[in-house]
Image (cartoon, grey):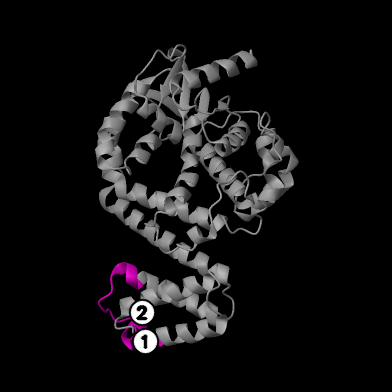
Amino acid sequence: MINSVPECIEQVKKYFLEYGNGEIERTAMMSKLSAAFAFIPVQILCGSKLSLSSQEQYEYEYMREMYEEFMRDSLSPLAAKNGLLSMQKSWLAIQTLDEMLTNGIPNKHEFSVIDKKDLKKTVYVDMNVMSALIEQIEIKDTGDYQFVYSPEHIEDFVFSKLEYHIPSLEAISSITDNITVAYYERGGYTYGKENAFFVYKNRVLPDIENIRRAKDMKAIDYSVDLENEYRSPSKYNGAVPIDNPFVFITKFKDDIDQVLLRIGAPFRIEDLINSKSENIEYSDCNPIIHYLYQAMDNMGFQQDTISESKLNEATSLSHDNYRKIRSSRLDIEHILYGSCCDYFVTLDKKLYFRASIIIKLLNRKCKVIHFKHQQGKSIYEEILNTISHYSEVDM
């Protein structure tokens, strides 16, 4: 039995989720929603303030609009499920904006710029490889190569158990000699020396809630894309030979353009192919990467399989099922930074395909490398041997 307005709001969310998952028919849904909204006191309808939090008030107003759309017979089950996700994303965005307006953005730096010419060949690794490197912390001579880290590596670790933070940061500092790749506020990317612990303490920790919300918002976007009408994994997967991922672009250019148009991208594949210059400005390359990655999600190309049961947890971003969803979209940030380097190394074949395509379309010279780690072997040696092999092939 519903005893309060907050309880009623939670019940309405439950009804919309059940409708979105096909667990309740439209007629029964109409009856339940009508009863629930009839319970809402007249004072709310008249704009009077009750004991509602800002989020409860926002959710009520949002779901009231969904209810009216449902009663007009213009809210499909999928639209109901996506509406709940959009409601969460909008609230996260409101919280983030309020936080930024109140406290500003942490921007303390101890960044000493290094000229690329003064560095060895730079190597960027994704999060899985970085984790493996940390576990095998015995640093060996990296020869002609310089491992680098990015702010995204630090942000990823901050959500692990607290006791892992300091050891992980110390390991990152040792692996990379505190050499980081970053973007100027205005301009292209650069390399510099900045202690990983300094980044953690002065920029990541003070902004932890906004970082968490940003990751949750990406997880929401990913969830919506998983049910896109253009998804056809059987059509697109397996169509790209391992030695030439760019075949995907030329073979399915029209399909990709159609999806790019649908998601509002301001460019088409031909625009990127015909571009002769490297995209180095953050304001240019960041949206290109995001749109291309989202288009591939829409199409189901080289995407992690996430079961429908995971999607049905749409109203609980704290649920363990969202860990996999988050990590899939966070690969975007590693492509953003990895594309600046000479080599981008990953253990994930799906990420290898996507990064190869995106980096080529950015006209970056970065070589994307996929390798398999054999348990018991030094991952440092495996990475360096694989890179050396690719370098010899390119000569």
Residue 358, located in which quarter of the rendered image? top right
Q: Choose between 193 and 21: the one closer to the eye.
A: 21
The residue under label 1 is which amino acid type? Answer: Phe
- Which percent across, then down, holds residue 71? 54, 82
Which quadrant is the C terminus positioned in?
Answer: top right
Going from N to C along the chain, the mark reached first, 2 or 1, is 2
Question: Can you identify the residue that label 1 sits on?
Answer: 39
The percent position of residue 34, horizontal first and vertical second, equals 46, 86
**For residue 62, above or below residue 94:** below
For the residues labelled 2 and 1, say whether their Cβ atoms are less than 8 Å apart.
yes
Relative to 385, say whether 55 is above or below: below
Q: Which residues are magenta?
A: 38-57
Q: Is residue 159 left or right of residue 392?
A: left
Q: Residue at x 50, y 33 (%)?
A: 281
Q: Is residue 184 above or below residue 330?
A: above
The reply, left or right, for residue 235 in relation to residue 44 is right
| Amino acid type, callout 2 | Cys
Is disc 2 surrounded by few (<14), some (14 to 19) or many (20+) residues within 10 Å? many
Q: Is residue 54 visible?
A: yes
Q: What secondary structure is found at the residue carrying circle 2? A: helix
Q: Give the residue pinned by disc 2.
A: 8
